[in-house]
Image: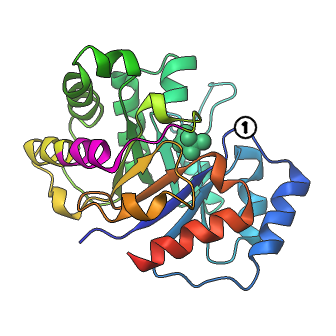
Amino acid sequence: MPKVHIVGNWKMNQNLESVRSFAKAFEGKGPFNCETWIAPQAIHISGLIENAGPIKVGSQTVSEHEKGAFTGELSPTSLKDIGATFTLVGHSERRQYYGEGNEVLNEKVKSALSHGLKVIYCVGETLEQRESGQMETILKEQVSDGLRGITSKDSLLIAYEPVWAIGTGVVATTQQAQQAHEYIRGLLSELGLESKDISILYGGSVKPNNIDGLLECPDIDGALVGGASLDPESFLALCQSGDKH
Ligand code: PGA
């Protein structure tokens, strides 16, 4: 059984003060049975690591290069150096606003894994793609191209985030989410990965009041949470749900 992961994606939110007060509010909480992870803005990774208690900290993206003349990029070795545990790769906002396609994302996945970071590789279809019956084709491309050449399930997690559910308040139904997760698990097996051991997280408008139904689905092993991870009480409630499953 894959381990349940509750992962906060703070995106370009939180400032020094709110990061500190989040950490303070979390003092003495945990340990949790589930994995509790947060990806703050890169600039806050070190500060959160020092004060995060049971929460493991990671980044929202990573460079495919190890080091060098790549202005503005985040080196996987430097992330590892400062104690980051994981990185997101291929979040839909990176795909949409920064033009990251499956090929470069594949480089990023490989680079992060080879430098000892765990990777949450994000996939998901837009509403237009779903409505025109292309969901499976899109997921298949994202999984098989983005994970090409990956031969070990170790340190790899997947997040299924339908783009139409991100930040919209429209959560996928448990049936829609379960169906996509099951399909993705099949794709991972086709790649030769031991998919039953890979945590597949659902993301898209997850809140304390809808997480339980999602976590009850057999192929949903956790959640990647944006908005509802910003508030310590709400993140705590999500972690407590994670503990029950
Ligand atoms: P949301 O974001 O929970 O605010 O919908 C999820 C995500 O983008 O990872």
In terms of image quarters, where does ligand 1 lie? top right
Residue at which label 1 appears:
12
* Residue in the picture at 88% in, 53% down: 16
In the rendered image, the vertical position of residue 236 relative to residue 81, given as above or below: below
Q: Position of residue 199 (x, y in %)?
A: 32, 59
Question: Local crowd at mark 1 within 10 Å, few (<14), some, or many (≥20)?
Answer: few
Q: Position of residue 207 (x, y in %)?
A: 57, 55
* Residue in the picture at 57% in, 61% down: 208
Viewer-closest of 43 and 233: 233
In the rendered image, the vertical position of residue 57 relative to residue 87, given as above or below: below
Please check the rendered image and state whether residue 171 is part of the magenta-colored stretch, yes or no. yes
For the stretch drawn in magenta, what is the main secondary structure? helix
**Mark 1 CB in 8 Å range of ligand 1?**
no
- Amino acid type at circle 1 is Met
Which stretch appears magenta?
170-182
* Residue in the picture at 25% in, 35% down: 143
Total number of numbered discs in the rendering: 1
Q: Position of residue 30 (x, y in %)?
A: 61, 83
**What quarter of the picture does the N terminus occupy?**
bottom left
Kindly state the secondary structure of the residue where label 1 is placed.
loop
Viewer-closest of 189 and 244: 244
In-image side of 118 versus 19 (left or right): left
Please check the rendered image and state whether residue 141 is part of the magenta-colored stretch, yes or no. no
Q: Which of the 4 image quarters holds residue 60?
A: top right
In the rendered image, the vertical position of residue 114 relative to residue 209, given as above or below: above
